[in-house]
Amino acid sequence: SQTIHQWPATLVQPVGSPLSLECTVEGTSNPNLYWYRQAAGRGLQLLFYSVGIGQISSEVPQNLSASRPQDRQFILSSKKLLLSDSGFYLCAWSWGSGNTIYFGEGSWLTVV
Amino acid sequence: TQLLEQSPQFLSIQEGENLTVYCNSSSVFSSLQWYRQEPGEGPVLLVTVVTGGEVKKLKRLTFQFGDARKDSSLHITAAQPGDTGLYLCAGARSGGGADGLTFGKGTHLIIQP
């Protein structure tokens, strides 16, 4: 069966510090991978998606970047965090495009 | 832009009551997913419906996909406190865009004991 894990689960970082959230998927190959941010009242906001190694598409211009160094690894990064980067971040995967998406456990980021 | 409108946004009812939440769009979707999310956790898939008019049951939950594949409903019978959570619907566009599904903003459901 397929599993997805992301870490850390909770992170408190000062403004201006770097960020690295990691996500791995097991039990499948060449999945589509996604990073979402969820804010109260705004629903799920797609940040980045990837259809293959090294292929990253950005949905929202912002202070964040994503990388896919391996087939089942997806990393969300920032060089300098802003207060507005605080939120609940979700990694997800799917079998190809237009298919059901499966989510990780989520990571709470608080920028102070 | 394809939007999914969920209603109501918030619903608080007593244990044992029945309820229905809705997911509507002016666009056609090839499939529609329902998720439940608890605070501090990722959304968990409940069901996928793919055929217009399809009805799926999951214990006390009944999911229906509209005949035109533009809308869906979730009906809960005899709600229990364990049903509390955020219910999200998500639609897949015909042709399957690489950017994934279109999500509604969710219905916050509270079942009071």
Image (cartoon, coloured by chain):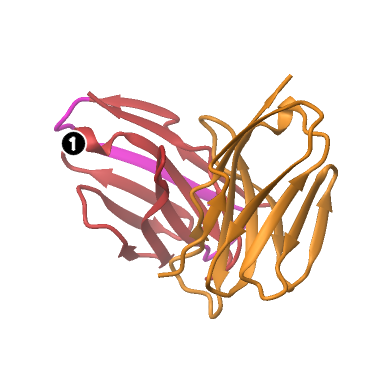
Chain colours: A red, B orange
Quadrant of the rendered structure where residue A20 is? top left
Q: Which residues are magenta?
A: A14-31
Q: Is residue A58 magenta?
A: no
**Looking at the image, which residue sits at the far bottom?**
B95
Secondary structure state at the residue bearing disc 1:
loop
Depth order, front residue of B18/A22: B18
Q: Is residue A16 magenta?
A: yes
Identify the residue shown where x is 50% and y is 56%: B103
Does residue B11 lie above or below A35 as drawn? above
Q: Position of residue A109 (x, y in %)?
A: 34, 31
Depth order, front residue of B107/B18: B18
Quadrant of the rendered structure where residue A48 is? bottom left
Identify the residue shown where x is 27% and y is 45%: A77
Q: Position of residue B5 (x, y in %)?
A: 52, 57
Q: Which residue is mark 1?
A: A82
Identify the residue shown where x is 85% and y is 44%: B59
Is the C terminus of chain B in the top left, top right, bottom left or bottom right quadrant?
top right
Depth order, front residue of B61/B96: B61
Quadrant of the rendered structure where residue A69 is? bottom left
At label 1, the amino acid type is Leu
Identify the residue shown where x is 48% and y is 38%: A106
Q: Residues within 10 Å of mark 1 (few under 14, many from 20)?
A: some
Q: Position of residue A52 (x, y in %)?
A: 42, 67
